[in-house]
């Protein structure tokens, strides 16, 4: 979902109809908000390495990369949501326990790195270098209270927006409520450059 105080323009669902197979599930919503192109994404989970859903996840990420080809390289861009990928080993409670599994496999991480190679920056890592800071915990096993989590919720921003990056926070308190989500909100504050 997207919420805006300044309105939404040029709203687009999916990849603009470029690939019906990749758009069989609602996974991306994009709009322009005050001169910033914002996409809310829910990257497929992948289930397990080698599964049909895993291959769909990798194909979907390739489709996202093609979709971003339409962006103005000098434009302001945010790509936010549940990526279902822990970018590196700092983002996993125990890399040995999940080595090679979905969310941490080399092809998934390479697909995420390819998005960042387009000039997008993981804003959380702009502010925090430490490991052990997670946005997701499996609620079925009580992993939140055990500290067994992953950082799979990301905000990727164009360099033009990172220049005005303020505070970044994973709101763990939101995860402590009664019947919470298995994800904690990731928040980032930007001072936007003047938009013509």
Image (tube, helix red, strand yellow):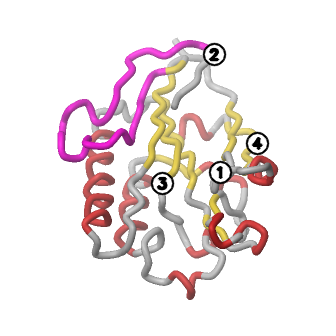
Q: Residue at x 52, y 20 (%)?
A: 33
Crowding at mark 1 (Cα within 10 Å: few <14, some 14-19, many 20+): some
Depth check: give the residue in front, 36 or 29. Answer: 29
In front: label 3 or label 4: 3
Between the residue at mark 2 and the residue at mark 4, the CA separation in whole angstroms equals: 19 Å
In front: label 1 or label 4: 1
Disc number placed over residue 95 in the picture, else none: none
CB-based contact (under 8 Å), mark 1 and mark 4: no
Please, is residue 88 above or below residue 118 in the view? below
Q: In the structure shown, which secondary structural element does the residue marked by tag 2 occupy?
A: loop
Between the residue at mark 3 and the residue at mark 1, the CA separation in whole angstroms equals: 16 Å
Please check the rendered image and state whether residue 21 is part of the magenta-colored stretch, yes or no.
yes
Q: Residue at x 67, y 34 (%)?
A: 164
Between the residue at mark 2 and the residue at mark 3, the CA separation in whole angstroms equals: 25 Å
Of the residues under marks 3 and 4, which one precedes in the sequence?
A: 3
Residue reaching furthest to the bottom: 96
**51 on left or right of 121:** left
Of the residues under marks 1 and 2, which one precedes in the sequence?
A: 2
Give the labeled residue for mark 4.
167
Give the labeled residue for mark 3.
83
Q: In the structure shown, which secondary structural element does the residue marked by tag 3 occupy?
A: loop
Disc number placed over residue 5 in the picture, else none: 2
In front: label 2 or label 4: 2
Magenta stretch, residue numbers = 6-32
Give the labeled residue for mark 1.
181
């Amino acid at each position: 979902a997207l919420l805006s105080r300044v309105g939404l323009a040029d709203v687009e669902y999916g990849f603009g109809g470029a690939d019906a197979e990749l758009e069989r599930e609602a996974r991306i919503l994009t709009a322009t908000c005050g001169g910033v192109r914002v996409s809310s994404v829910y990257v497929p989970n992948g289930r397990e390495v080698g599964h049909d859903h895993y291959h769909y996840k990798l194909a979907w990420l390739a489709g996202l990369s093609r979709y971003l080809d339409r962006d103005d390289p000098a434009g302001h861009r945010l790509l936010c949501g549940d990526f279902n990928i822990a970018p590196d080993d700092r983002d996993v409670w125990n890399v040995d326990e999940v080595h090679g599994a979905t969310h941490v496999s080399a092809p998934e991480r390479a697909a995420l790195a390819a998005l960042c190679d387009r000039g997008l920056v993981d804003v959380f890592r702009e502010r925090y270098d430490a490991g052990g800071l997670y946005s997701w915990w499996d609620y079925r096993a009580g992993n939140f209270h055990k500290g067994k989590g992953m950082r799979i919720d990301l905000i990727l921003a164009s360099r033009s927006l990172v220049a005005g990056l303020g505070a970044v926070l994973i709101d763990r308190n939101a995860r402590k409520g009664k019947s919470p989500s298995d994800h904690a909100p990731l928040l980032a504050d930007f001072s936007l450059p003047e938009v013509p």
